[in-house]
Amino acid sequence: MPERGSPALRRRRLGMELRRLREGLNMTGDEVSDRLGWSTAKVSRIETAKTLAKEEDVEALCGLYGVDEHLREALVALRHDAARKGWWERYRSSVPEDYITLIGMEAEATMTRDWEPQVVPGLLQTKEYAREVLAAGQHASQLPSSWFQDRAEIRMMRQHTLLHAPRPLTHISVFHESVLKNQYGDAQVMRDQLLHLIEISRLPHVEIRILPQDVPPPVSTGTFVHLTFSDFPDVVYLESLFGGRFIEDAEMVYGYERAFGHLMERALDETASQELMRNTTEYWKR
């Protein structure tokens, strides 16, 4: 099983650490570039993770900043990790760039909170249900069939690497009760999906909450995922038909955090949500 961890975020972590060291010495990017014979743009691109620093670049910066041997070794090791490719890179040609970025962020996140008003969240889907959801979307988006297959594979890989890893992701989902009866595939596909939800909700790091049909949604927004990291600011991902976009503005991210809190307040608790899912499996025996 591939390890969790995103080279892209490790690159950002390296850049942030190098910038912290420079600013701690009250040095400007121009001063660093003059001392090392680099362009100012190179310093900026390394610090903003637009360029992966070479090992000799990290060594040069460590020498200039006077870091001790222990920190130098840690930064060089971080640079090596950042140079490795994530398992998702092989799918780059068949999925949007923002989705690749999302997968990389998930790999480094400590927690994701997911609101879904229409379908079972991707991290909780069975293979058969995922295929049906993707097939339904393919008619509207006109994606090539090869892309369709890749996206189904990605969805399963995300589950294995995030929810069943030695260091699993903490995942909280809230979705509308109507999701349990929005049909994708035949009745057996739906029933198997609900049984899977019940089973996976028993994992200590997975929490599934359902917003009842008779409770007006306290937020009027489509799907969003709120990602929390150990050493990066929180990020929100908004999903759309042809991709998605990221919200990084702290005030807006906090707004989505509050919105998710309102959803949690109105949703059933875990035990009642499991009971509702269990009862709905009877509906799909028809």
Image: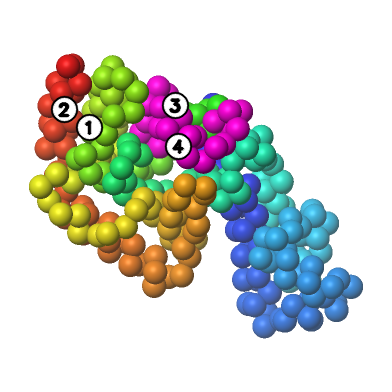
The image shows residue 51 at horizontal and vertical percentages of 74, 59
- Can the viewer see residue 108 in this picture? no
Closer mark to the observer between disc 4 and disc 2: 4
Q: Nearer the viewer, residue 202 or 88?
A: 88
Give residue 81's quadrant in the image.
top right
Q: Residues within 10 Å of mark 3 (few under 14, many from 20)?
A: many
Q: Amino acid at mark 3?
A: Arg
The residue that mark 2 highlights is 280
- Can the viewer see residue 195 in this picture? yes
Q: Amino acid at mark 2?
A: Thr
Give residue 209's quadrant in the image.
top left
Is disc 1 in contact with disc 2, using a CB cutoff of under 8 Å?
yes
The residue that mark 4 highlights is 137
Q: Nearer the viewer, residue 181 or 81?
A: 181
Please report the residue visible at 18 percent of the width from the left and 16 percent of the height from the top: 285
Q: Residues within 10 Å of mark 4 (few under 14, many from 20)?
A: some
Q: Amino acid at mark 1?
A: Lys
Residues drawn in magenta: 122-148
Does the stretch in magenta take in 192?
no
Q: Is residue 277 above or below residue 84?
A: above
Upstream in the sequence, badge 3 or badge 2?
3
Upstream in the sequence, badge 1 or badge 4?
4
